[in-house]
Image (cartoon, rainbow, N blue to C red):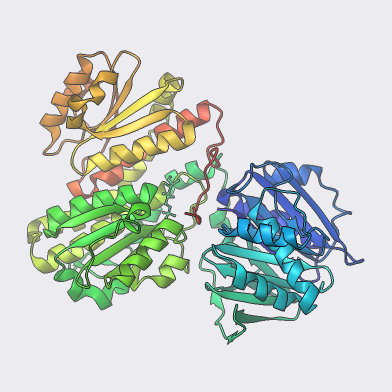
Amino acid sequence: MCGIVGYIGKRNSINIIFDGLKRLEYRGYDSAGVAVINDENEFNYYKKAGKVKELEKDFNGEILDGNIGIGHTRWATHGEPNDNNAHPHFDMNKHISVVHNGIIENFKTLKKKLTQEGYTFSTDTDTEVLANLIDFHCKTTHDFEKAVRYALTEVEGTYGLAMLCNTEPDKIIIARMGSPLMFGLGKDEIIVSSDAAAIIKHTKNVIYLEDGEMAILKRDGFQIKTINDVDIQREVQKIEYDLEQIEKGGFEHFMLKEICEQPDTIQNTYRGRINFETYDVKLGGLDSVREKLFNAKRIIITACGTAWHAGLVGEYMLEHYCRIPTEVEYASEFRYRNPIINKDDIVIVISQSGETADTRAAMKEAQRLGATVIGIVNAVGSTIAREVDCGTYIHAGPEIGVASTKAFTSQLMSLALITLMIGKHKGTIKEEEFKEIVDELKILPGKMKEIIGKMNEYKFVAEEFKDSLNFLYLGRGMNFPVALEGALKMKEISYIHAEGYPAAEMKHGPIALIDENMPVVFVAPKDDTYDKIVTNIEEIKARKGKIITISTDHDEEIKAYSDYTLSVPKTVDIFAPILNSIPLQFLSYYIASARGNNVDQPRNLAKSVTVE
Ligand code: M6R
């Protein structure tokens, strides 16, 4: 939710900032802007509604010359995404420049106070209020750092901030409360960013800022402090991935690349965690809570969006294979509904980015109530990963496409591994079945490759349905959340209205929607629910709905009921959601592409939602 980049060093900052902003654009892309301090200690800036490349096309490199600067790509919260509301923002005297990720909740009160002091405002944003507030404190302190500190003690809300002051042009000050921020240490230069993607090209040595901290960054060094002026020592960490992992590598879109990476990413999730000789599961990150997990009377899973769908599959897994009562909560609801949690409960938080504000707040609430909180996270070193009691990384690698794909299947794999670990220990998974599941793991990536190899089939079906106005997705058991996820993918990138339901729920209402124009996607593998779902398919067929089934290879029977079948290889039940999800990802991808949509950056969305 908004990307921040800053540069201080010997090179011209502008190209570094543009390059960084493009890499962070998945965080928000309503508008973008840059500000640099030039040799005369004046601000030169340019900001504009739209994408970074629009801004770059228009800007005049010479005017923006300077080796200290900040940039921003925005996902609007306060004020519509026009040129004026784009960041950076300035105080009315053009003395301070600020880029901001987050929300200043008491900005109206602060604005009133500053107005009484004679300040005027030219935008609708909360950020401009902060710029003026810093200027206000500069007037009395004559010290940029102190002014920032005083201003931040008055601010309520969340922020990741990078700030410049043209009377102290040798520093960038950054601060963090609730919105991620880090800086990379190069040779005689420092690069600030909301995440590692904008830094990795320049250095792999990074420092993460924690909540309540600020850092004063200069060409020759840095200082970290709390907002209350207490010095902090922090270790340098290494970014764990390479530049090529965040580039498209010849694919038309990141989403397509990420769908196709899944045979590898799934292996990265289980690599080193399964012993195929001894049939053991070891999740090192969960060592400290093994006994608690084995004795758990209740597990609560909390997450948002796609990660919440993974949690729903996890509920089926943990209840079916481990016999542990499991509940799944929307993180955004969990924190506000006074949940009944006690110290024996295990709470699992799932997050690709590790930065989702609602998920983080749910985690904190669970910790406050005394539960043990386990994270299933992708982004290494992210806020949630650092703040959970313990956890397991899914190791899917950077996911850039806004629509989550490979992270989803790796989240499912992580949940399966936890299930296997508990189920084996408790004996709720019989030895023979356990071995069958583990053996299946060895051939699962090959089966995923087979599914990916059928791109032309997905394209063909996508072409048939690209002009549909609605879609229904139906599944049963563990494949009901797969249906929900299929519908979410369709909605978010194709902008076609889509809903997921448990297949048998249709007859209780939604069946009224069925006519010859309604495509209905059934997730219908050959499992225990098969006969029931065939009956549900017949009910739709009788009402002339168009039926697309995700079926099991060689299932000839289901073809008779379906208008289109997209089949996947047979697998054990616990991995079926992983295989069944892939054709649904492709279907939404090809429909969105055929409609000419920006697949990687769908309208109104951002990759990580760091505001409530
Ligand atoms: O980073 P997180 O996994 O915490 O994100 C949660 C949701 O915002 C995310 O899954 C969202 O629903 C995706 N756009 C789905 O494709």
- Is 293 left or right of 596, judged from the image as shown? left
Percent across and percent down for residue 6 are 70, 64
Q: Is residue 212 above or below residue 59?
A: below
Percent across and percent down for residue 126 are 64, 55
Pick the residue in front: 550 or 408: 408
Percent across and percent down for residue 514 are 28, 18
Q: Quadrant of residue 131?
A: bottom right
Residue 145 visible in image: yes
Residue 445 visible in image: no
- Is 18 left or right of 540, judged from the image as shown? right
Q: Is residue 51 above or below residue 335?
A: above
Pick the residue in front: 484 or 140: 140
- Is 257 left or right of 515, judged from the image as shown? right
Pick the residue in front: 141 or 17: 141
Residue that appears at 66% across and 75% down: 150
Percent across and percent down for residue 212 are 55, 74
Q: Is residue 5 above or below residue 582?
A: below
